[in-house]
Amino acid sequence: MLATSVREAPVLARLREETAKQASARMQISPDQGQFMALLAELIGARQCLEIGAFTGYSALAVALALPGDGRIITCDIDQETTAIARRFWAQAEVDHKIDLRLAPALETLEILMAEGAAGGFDFAFIDANKEDYDCYYEAVLGLMRPGGLIAIDNVLWGGAVADPHKQDQDTRAICALNAKLKGDERVSLSLATIGDGLTLARKR
């Protein structure tokens, strides 16, 4: 499947190789998922995007490469070391002008955006940060999305832990709770794609 479908830009491949050297490399999304999200952004004509959790910048780079020249991504993270890698590769790809990194707790950044009148102004969002705050991220991001905007939420299968009743750690419980909430959330249209570690797509109605 990967050999016949993934068109990974050389700069993305180099970033993935650099990330593999990190102790937390498992946090990296797969190239097929990055390509899938880029396609989604293209399909909805996204120009204004949000990202919760930048890590080393692969997902932001994949989407930024698909955005038009006036497209923009606001990405939130708190780790200066991993985002320094991200900045370097964004610059190499010449898309750094499209990416606005906010080094602060994501909920604070989302609150600031709301206070600045950004509600309803975003087309696409990707949530991939600390799992215990997933519900808070979802609610804040939903308020910032336009009708028809698309939210992608990563790790919703959590390595299969969400289907194991013996897994009762905080992260697993948080993901299970959000999955259950989303199933009944009439504010969005919903689909869970089994790509990567599970990617929920929620389109704001």
Image (tube, grey):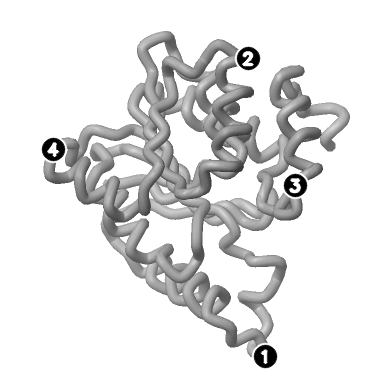
Q: Secondary structure at mark 3?
A: loop
Name the residue that disc number 4 marks: 116
The residue lying at 29 percent from left, 59 percent from top is 139
Q: Amino acid at mark 2?
A: Gln
Q: Amino acid at mark 1?
A: His
Residue 125 appearing in the image: no
Establish if 71 lies above or below 195.
Answer: above
Q: Residues within 10 Å of mark 4 (few under 14, many from 20)?
A: few
Name the residue that disc number 1 marks: 166
Check contact, mark 3 vs mark 1: CB within 8 A. Answer: no
Q: Earlier in the sequence, mark 2 or mark 4?
A: 2
Establish if 165 lies above or below 52.
Answer: below
Q: CA distance from mark 3 to mark 1?
A: 30 Å
Q: Earlier in the sequence, mark 2 or mark 1?
A: 2
* Mark seen at residue 22: 3
Q: CA distance from mark 4 to mark 3?
A: 36 Å
Q: Earlier in the sequence, mark 4 or mark 3?
A: 3
- In the image, is 62 to the left or to the right of 52? right
Q: Nearer the viewer, mark 2 or mark 4?
A: 2
Name the residue that disc number 2 marks: 92
Q: Secondary structure at mark 4?
A: loop
